Image (cartoon, coloured by chain):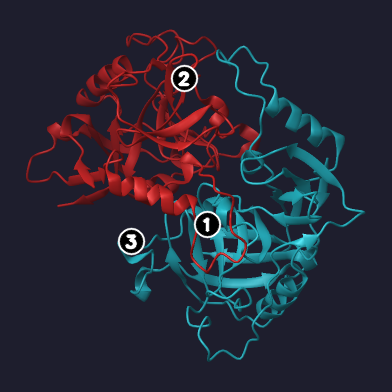
Chain colours: A red, B cyan
Amino acid sequence: MWREAEPERLVYMELQDGLVLIELNPMFAPRTVKQFTALVEDGFYDGLPFYRVIEGFVAQGGDGSDLGEFSEVPLLDAEFEIDWPADASWTAVQSPDMFAPQTGFIDGFAAARDPAGGKAWLTHCPGVVAMARNEGPDTSRTDFYIVIGQAPRYLDRNMNVFGRVIHGMDAVQSINRGRPADDGIIRDEAASSRIKRMRMGNQVAETERLTALVPDTSHASFQEVLDQRRDRRQPFFHNKPPRVLDVCQVPVGGRATR
Amino acid sequence: MWREAEPERLVYMELQDGLVLIELNPMFAPRTVKQFTALVEDGFYDGLPFYRVIEGFVAQGGDGSDLGEFSEVPLLDAEFEIDWPADASWTAVQSPDMFAPQTGFIDGFAAARDPAGGKAWLTHCPGVVAMARNEGPDTSRTDFYIVIGQAPRYLDRNMNVFGRVIHGMDAVQSINRGRPADDGIIRDEAASSRIKRMRMGNQVAETERLTALVPDTSHASFQEVLDQRRDRRQPFFHNKPPRVLDVCQVPVGGRATR
């Protein structure tokens, strides 16, 4: 029930508190993944801070100025949703979910879809990685955020979601927060957590690479996991919970080993 | 729109990474609050570890043996839900919510209710503090957990929820995790984060006490906050989100100042 994450789709992000592995999603965000991959390969993010960190919401990192007009990196067009791919393997979770007609998993990622409109999108669950932007939909560039709190699903279909943390979420949770009164902005550079180094998996020497296994969400045993979480039969449940599942509350973390 | 948390209902929990303030809820869990308060006053928790910590789920602390039969501390009866208090001030959030007929806020706490059955209960949102237990409903004693990930709402009406973190959730998020393969259990005592000291607010010298302000969820301005979160009118929202609110995604943290 496990598949191995491909090194070309895997980001090694080294933080002070440990290594974080991010799996990219070119199916939903091909242009964002391409540009982000090139930036990682160039060492663009090395040494940059998480400069806007709001407890229970997001940790946003990058150079903090690229949302302005002086960057040489091109702006990215919106990649908020895709036409539903006919050949995609969809494992249904909930229909309707509070925020979408249907939720489910596709290739390990929590997602939602609207059969009437024929669209699908990645949902803002904890650990999701997406591009920050300005007011316009096509204003992403290099700054990104990681969701660190209760799923802000109202952002769904409004951001370029392009990856998810599959290992090291505890290190992400140790990133220094900003003050709520400052909207999480950390102006004191010494107070911000930094990205020591970011590399693509295929830039990492083979002897150093980790074997990163993620749940195969199209496997029958994953379906069983979902069924058990939906139908809590254990006597522990004195009051039987409603037979519903929050797609963001299903554990789909990976296992990274040497 | 703020009210001050009363020192008799406020727990000062000192962790290695900072101070955590927990507001207790005697309306929903009077017996649990009474016993927990007495334990805190006796210094019961000082030095004890968080011995079961699952990333994205809960940090469970205490002596780790009290769920057994050798404790001198009495078992607690279930306090999973209450009869709806006629005079309670309820600020509605969502009806129906995916997990309950109605959600809302009562006295600063996220809650749910079932008008048909006349019952109300506290919801398992991030930062919620509840008693651990064995299989039987009346088997809580001293061990407790803090929710550190996506709301595990399937636990609602099944646990003695008795408080919530109003300050220092970043310190809680820095608690060392156990391995998922070990169900989060940390057997190596040196690897576990510990409670340096836990005191009730009224045990803290007045000169050391913090002024802990929490949102007054019955105030009209809090209703406005909810309305704005439900109806995202900003041009930033290229795709307008559905007009729904997740009660666990509304920020209700406090402000602690000297």
Mark 1 — residue?
B172
Mark 2 — residue?
A115
Across the whole image, how many numbered discs are drawn on residues?
A: 3
Q: Residue at x 37, y 38 (%)?
A: A194
Q: Nearer the viewer, residue A232 or B73?
A: A232
Amino acid tagged 3: Arg
Q: Nearer the viewer, mark 3 or mark 2?
A: 2
**In contact (CB < 8 Å): disc 1 and disc 2:** no
Mark 3 nearby-residue class (10 Å; few <14, some 14–19, many ≥20): some
Same chain, marks 3 and 2?
A: no
Mark 1 nearby-residue class (10 Å; few <14, some 14–19, many ≥20): many
The x, y position of residue B71, in whole percent, is 56, 89
* Label 3: chain letter: B
Q: Could you say which quadrant of the image residue B177 lies in?
A: bottom left
Residue A28 falls left or right of residue B164: left
Q: Nearer the viewer, residue A253 or B15?
A: A253
Q: Nearer the viewer, mark 3 or mark 1?
A: 3
Q: Compared to B242, does B133 lie above or below?
A: below
Between the residue at mark 1 and the residue at mark 2, the CA separation in whole angstroms equals: 40 Å
Mark 3 — residue?
B179
Amino acid tagged 2: Pro
Between the residue at mark 3 and the residue at mark 2, the CA separation in whole angstroms equals: 39 Å
Secondary structure category for the residue under label 3: loop
* Label 2: chain letter: A
Q: Residue at x 41, y 39 (%)?
A: A127
